[in-house]
Amino acid sequence: MGKRIGMEVSLAAAEAVKQAKVDVISAYPITPQTHIVEHLSEIVANGEMDAEFFCVESEHSALSVCLGSEATGARSFTCTSSQGLALMSEITYIASALRLPIVMIIANRALSGPISIWNDHSDVMSIRDCGWIQYFAENGQDVYDHVFIAYRLAENRSVLLPVIINLDGFTLSHVIEPIEFIEQEKIDQFLPPYQPVHRLHPDRPVSMGGIALPSIFTETKKAHEVAIRSSMSKILDTWKAFGEMTGRYYHPIETYKTEDAETLIVIMGSYAETASVAVDLMREEGRSVGLAKIRLWRPFPFEDFKKATLHAKQLVVIDRAISMGGPGGPVASEVKAALYGEPMHPAVYNYAAGLGGRDVSPADFIKMVDKAEIEIEEGNREGFEIYGVRE
Amino acid sequence: MTKPDSEWTWKELPEGTVMLEPGNADQYRTGDWKTLKPVLNKALCIHCGLCYIFCPDMSYSLDSEGYFIVDLFYCKGCGICAKECPTGAITMVAETEEK
């Protein structure tokens, strides 16, 4: 068993990047991602890591550098938040279309405006359809572990897709948590050096990033869509291999006290831990409540989700972003799509909560469940509301 | 490419639509973009090579008799050669009027 150390989650993420023996780091500092790249630049400057650290002038360039370095076969890493992600969004689609296994951590932060440096999921939802595999981390250990999991998965020759690890800005990035570190020899076994299928090399010239005429563009999209859909089995294999190494097993949908529960809270990210406290409090009062956490956002685990939730009477889906003028929040939208084909399915009551860093306490979760149960009882089976707004 | 892109199925595409065959742009017919094509009057040609120099697509090449001949597989019909020709040996002719 590895050493257990109390450490800020951002620093643990940086240490994981070091242990993953990344060759190229390219990033531009933005709150709340800053500590991750600051610590990486220290590690590289101190000679503790044999990597090239590119100080770029923007996030657009940060990911563009990773595109180039990954294309030559160098394991590459970047990291951003909010406006930075918006600026690099153009390149996110290109990275996945080129099937370059870059790993990016997003310290999730609200998109302006108004300007907010605090946490919600509106930044990553803006690139929801960019074709990367996307995880949501619940705690610091998840973040540390998923750096290795992400590289091993991304570089798998039958996957070859970039991976995003979402971690909540401040509520996760800036807190100190106990992190169990994995010995370097184990990591080296789990994550051997990257062996690209195609790469830029003068001995065997290839062209990457060419134009696709209407006569072939559709075929490229089909190939990409099939690649991300069929990555599911490798995602499960990778988690299994990681579990066998560390004893920590991860799943696309993780459940807490769901088996006999009538009401399930559904949420992604670090607030799942707060929600589990609320579930315990409600259970003490004899209420039939459980929690389903979505760890894997893309590809969306439709089957696992149905398996975990179909037995419930109602789902209280808590989104950290709003699809303005749309169906409510993006998570509830996916949840409804997952359940649509089922003849009998739970009611879905949707809240947007914790926007722009507003705290959501266990008491808030209980209030949300209370109100949702009443609304559904009164026949409002598909409600959406923004929680905690002052009227 | 080894075959026209309209014949590739999605299963055949290399990962990331990487082009594995270098220099395949020379198989790309840009000649069908044009509406006008350059026609050379050899009687007026002084072999100066300005058409060859100015052609943005490098569609001109020297033949064994010393004339610069356009390759209509690539020529997009921009007309720069006709504009630059100092003796007016090149005229742009609508393709449909070809005799």
Image (cartoon, coloured by chain):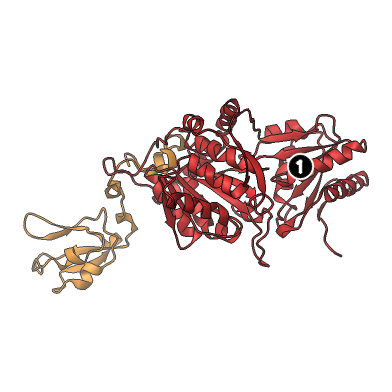
Amino acid type at mark 1: Val
Point out residue A95 in the picture as x, y percentages from the top left corner: 47, 48
Label 1: state its secondary structure. Answer: strand
Point out residue A85 in the picture as x, y percentages from the top left corner: 56, 57
Mark 1 highlights which residue? A266
User: The C terminus of chain A lies in which quarter of the figure?
Assistant: bottom right
Residue at the image point whose x is 47% and y is 43% from the top: A220
Foreground pick, A135 / A172: A172
Foreground pick, A237 / A46: A46
Vertical relation: A359 (above or below) A199: below
Quadrant in which residue A347 is drawn: top right
Vertical relation: A266 (above or below) A124: above
State the hue of chain A: red
Q: In this view, does A227 lie to the left or right of A258?
A: left
Point out residue A48 in the picture as x, y percentages from the top left corner: 44, 45
Q: Is residue A325 visible?
A: no
Q: Can residue A32 be seen in this view?
A: yes
User: The N terminus of chain A lies in which quarter of the figure?
Assistant: top right
Point out residue A153 in the picture as x, y percentages from the top left corner: 52, 35
Q: Is residue A104 left or right of residue A296?
A: left
Chain in orange, by letter, is: B
Crowd around label 1: few <14 · some 14–19 · many ≥20 (10 Å): many
